Image: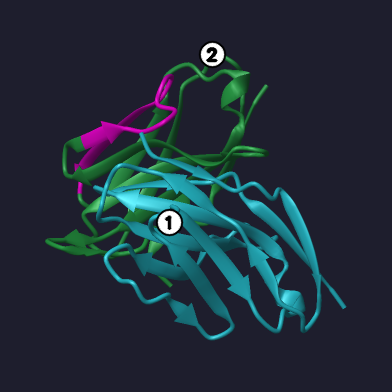
Amino acid sequence: DAGITQSPRHKVTETGTPVTLRCHQTENHRYMYWYRQDPGHGLRLIHYSYGVKDTDKGEVSDGYSVSRSKTEDFLLTLESATSSQTSVYFCAISEIIATYTGELFFGEGSRLTVL
Amino acid sequence: AQTVTQSQPEMSVQEAETVTLSCTYDTSENNYYLFWYKQPPSRQMILVIRQEAYKQQNATENRFSVNFQKAAKSFSLKISDSQLGDTAMYFCAFMKGGKLIFGTGTRLQVFP
């Protein structure tokens, strides 16, 4: 199994509070991703990173920010959590070198509930 | 922007039978990658099969195979000899330039 650890795995918070989810990898892959999964929507890309300090927006980036100061860590921050951000969040990693594109390996998910 | 459509929210199949899950996508790109991922009740995302768009030959992986029709932008998954352990959500996904975009998924139930 790919070495991907998400923390926390479960969190309950209140509307308006900041929340940070952490993704840690031991594979030294360049690409890292944050997805959210909601019923009827599948997995939707929030943000992704293609290197240290290099990030880009996905389909549903509003209300989220990310940071990547080290290859192994990718942080997702909700500056002021809202109930619509209640979801299961998945981190994923991938390696893309020249013409080779690898598949994404996923973490186990973090369930966030915003009351 | 690329989109991925899975038009079958739910499907069921009897054990040992064959089932096909549909997926279509929309893109103007010529080179890209397509994937099927499986998500069992454990919630873990598991790669089932991948297809490079530049390869005409359909990918196969044991009981899993795809029917890749590039001109039609279709990428269906066939599961042969279905097993109870195949019960899961199945997601079709499109990848280009490092971004993986998913369809909404098909929930497959395998009955004994």
- The Cα–Cα distance between marks 1 and 2, rounded to whole angstroms, is 26 Å
Q: Is residue A59 above or below residue B97?
A: above
Q: Residue at x 76, y 59 (%)?
A: B11
Position in image of residue B77 (x %, y %): 57, 67
Disc 1 packing (10 Å; few <14; some 14–19; many ≥20): some
Q: Is residue A77 above or below residue A28?
A: above
Task: Give the labeled residue for mark 2.
Answer: A16
The answer to whether any part of residue B42 appears in the image is no
- Outermost residue toward the right? B112
Q: Are marks 1 and 2 in contact (CB under 8 Å)?
A: no
In front: B112, or A75? B112
Q: Secondary structure at mark 2?
A: loop
Q: Secondary structure at mark 1?
A: strand
- Outermost residue toward the left? A98
Q: Is residue B8 above or below residue A54?
A: below
In front: B11, or A69? B11
Which chain corresponds to the colour green?
A
In the drawing, what numbered circle is on residue B30? none
Q: Residue at x 43, y 56 (%)?
A: A5
Give, as a single range, the part of the protein colored magenta: A55-70
- Does the stretch in magenta take in B64? no
Task: Give the labeled residue for mark 1.
Answer: A5
What amino acid is labelled 2 in the image?
Gly
What amino acid is labelled 1 in the image?
Thr
**Which quarter of the figure has residue B23?**
bottom right
In front: B52, or A94? B52
Position in image of residue A59 (x %, y %): 41, 31
Query: Chain B: what color?
Result: cyan
Horizontally, residue A1 falls left or right of residue B14, namely left
- Does the stretch in magenta take in A57? yes
Disc 2 packing (10 Å; few <14; some 14–19; many ≥20): some
In front: B20, or A31? B20
